[in-house]
Amino acid sequence: KAGVTQTPRYLIKTRGQQVTLSCSPISGHRSVSWYQQTPGQGLQFLFEYFSETQRNKGNFPGRFSGRQFSNSRSEMNVSTLELGDSALYLCASSLEGTQPQHFGDGTRLSIL
Amino acid sequence: AQSVTQLGSHVSVSEGALVLLRCNYSSSVPPYLFWYVQYPNQGLQLLLKYTSAATLVKGINGFEAEFKKSETSFHLTKPSAHMSDAAEYFCAVSAGNQGGKLIFGQGTELSVKP
């Protein structure tokens, strides 16, 4: 069974640009959650999507948004990039959300 | 609201020694508790989970954790450390009514000396 797949693995952007990250969950998983990992703030929850609806949201500005498609694949978008957005972005999927989450290897985003 | 505190950002043990990584949680509802491990340039791998069944939970790679409600703790242990255990370990909590929202501790980096 294929795991959670995140693309791309690495991205370099400049301030002010926007970026879209993609996550393909494990087959059959309907919940997809996104996390930001930085050395200073650690792992922080961004949002969760379940059956194409945002079910939970963390404390991030509106520049961070996401969506989920009917096949459960999810995308995360960050607009007007700032230097502080440099981080490892992790996606996790689970059957129903309360079940253990399985993580992808992340997308490392660097802002110049 | 839920929160997690991991005591010790760095722990160093000798190969073959006991591994003990500490985690205390705060939750207003019965929690689901997890331990994850992260190797360099990789995502998080689930070691074990507590979901209100047995208080002593066995996980992969010889790790186990004990849920102690009176101490609000969920410490991770392994009787004998191996060099391959060197990694960063995260304790996480979620509430049953919070869906897929995990709250993580700050992580503990485990070093294993030969």
Image: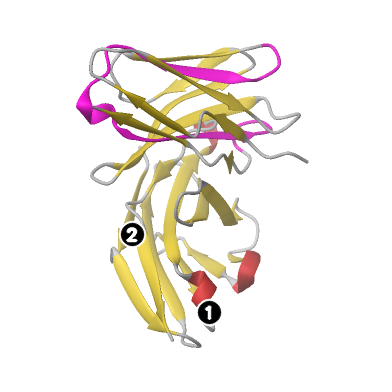
Q: Nearer the viewer, residue B108 or A7?
A: A7
Residue B71 visible in the current orientation: no
Pick the residue in front: B76 or A14.
A14
SS assignment at label 2: strand
Dot 2 falls on which chain?
A: B
Residue A22 visible, this angle = yes
Q: Residues within 10 Å of mark 2 (few under 14, many from 20)?
A: many
Q: Residue at x 39, y 46 (%)?
A: B104
**What amino acid does circle 2 point to?**
Gln
Q: Amino acid at mark 1?
A: His
Q: Residue at x 22, y 21 (%)?
A: A82
Labels 2 and 1 touching (C-beta < 8 A) = no
**How far apart are labels 2 and 1 at the CA level?**
21 Å
Q: Residue at x 55, y 35 (%)?
A: A92
Towards the viewer: A26 or B84: B84
Residue drawn at x 48%, y 68% is B76
Magenta segment: A70-98
Mark toward the start of the polypeptide (2 vs 1): 2
| Residue that label 1 marks | B82
Q: Chain of mark 1?
A: B
Q: Around disc 1, counting alpha carbons within 10 Å, would you say few (fewer than 14), some (14 to 19), or many (20 or more)?
A: many
- Look at the image and name its color scheme: secondary structure
Q: Determine if the magenta segment contains residue A92.
A: yes
Where is residue A58 drawn, in percent x and y? 36, 26
Percent position of residue A107, x then y: 46, 33
Residue A68 rendering spot, x and y as whole percentages:
58, 15
Task: Tell me if residue A43 comes above or below residue A93 in the rendering.
Answer: below
Residue at numbered disc 2: B6
Quadrant of res A5: top right
Residue A112 — which label? Answer: none
**Residue placed furthest toward the right:** A1
